[in-house]
Amino acid sequence: MIVLSELTEQIEVSASASENKFMTEAAQLLGCKVYHIPRDFERCGTAENAL
C-alpha cells in the first residue's frame, strides 16, 4: 500500500493537521510506503511532477 501525505515539518495548530500527522505515523508503523506531497510546488514545478 502506498500512502500520500500532506504532513509537513511546519507544526500547525489545527484538528486536521493533528489528524494528518497521526494517520501518517500510523501508516508508517503498519509498514506502508509514505510519500509526502509538498504544500507548494516550488521544487517540482507542478502537482503532476510532485506525484
Image: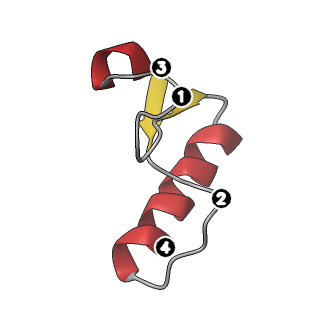
Q: Residues within 10 Å of mark 4 (few under 14, many from 20)?
A: some
Q: Is residue 18 above or below residue 41?
A: below
Residue for badge 4: 18
Is residue 51 visible in this depiction of the protein? Answer: no
Residue at 65%, 39% in the rendered image: 28
Distance from the alpha carbon under mark 1 to that under mark 2: 16 Å
The answer to whether residue 32 is left or right of residue 3 is: right
Residue for badge 1: 43
* Mark nearer the N terminus (4 vs 2): 2
Closest to the camera, between mark 4 and mark 3, is: 4
Q: Nearer the viewer, residue 27 or 46?
A: 46
Q: Residue 40: name its quadrant.
A: top left
Label 4, secondary structure: give it.
Answer: helix
Q: Residues within 10 Å of mark 3 (few under 14, many from 20)?
A: few
* Mark nearer the N terminus (4 vs 1): 4
Q: Nearer the viewer, residue 27 or 36?
A: 36
Distance from the alpha carbon under mark 1 to that under mark 3: 26 Å
Residue for badge 3: 1
What's under tag 2, amino acid-wise?
A: Glu
Residue 22 image offset from top left, x and y in percent: 54, 62
